[in-house]
Image (cartoon, helix red, strand yellow):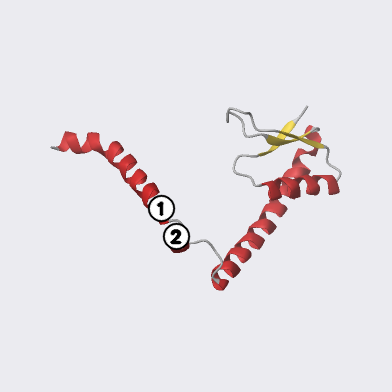
Amino acid sequence: MAKLLLNLRNVGQDERQEVGELLDRNGIAWYRTEPSPWGISHGGIWLRENDDHPRAKALMADYQAERSRRVRGEREAALRDGTAETFGSLFRQRPLYVILVLLGMLAAAALVLLPFMLLRG
């Protein structure tokens, strides 16, 4: 029976590929389900055999710890080099977009807080 190893919500293509290669290198049979066209399911990486689950989870823990260190190091290097995307760089590149997003956030917060403000007054 199949067992879900990784939900692919917010998982990049590079990570999907690396996890697949990790499982292949370690002889673990797996398959991937694709996201649904309506956004209900985001897909996943499934193990074909339940018995492989403990070993796959241990491999994933090691992989994710290593990936975390690597990605954080890349981010720190990009910040030092000045190539990382920051709020300031995004605002300089797309000021209208940033202003519209901020206005949208303020409007959403106002709609949420409006009932409480009306009850107070």
Is residue 23 left or right of 16 when viewed as pictured?
right
Q: Amino acid at mark 2?
A: Phe
Residue 100 higher or lower than 78, as above or below: above
> Considering the image in quadrants, where does the C terminus appear?
top left
User: Is disc 1 placed on a helix, strand or loop?
Assistant: helix
Percent position of residue 33, x then y: 71, 32
Write the residue at 72% across / 53% down: 63
Report which quarter residue 37 is drawn in: top right
Question: Closest to the observer: 1 or 118?
Answer: 118
Percent position of residue 25, x then y: 85, 49
Report which quarter residue 48 is drawn in: top right
CB contact under 8 Å: marks 2 and 1 = yes
Write the residue at 30% across / 37% down: 112
- Please give the residue where the numbered disc 2 appears in the rendered image: 87
Q: Amino acid at mark 1?
A: Val
> Which badge, 2 or 1, is on the more N-terminal residue?
2
Total labels: the figure holds: 2
Residue 22 higher or lower than 78, as above or below: above
Write the residue at 42% across / 50% down: 97
Percent position of residue 105, x then y: 36, 45
Percent position of residue 43, x then y: 66, 34
Q: Nearer the viewer, mark 2 or mark 1?
A: 1
Is residue 36 left or right of 101 when viewed as pictured?
right
Residue 98 image label:
1
User: Is disc 2 placed on a helix, strand or loop?
Assistant: helix
> Considering the image in quadrants, where does the N terminus appear?
top right
Q: Tell me how far mark 2 sits from mark 1, CA to CA.
A: 9 Å
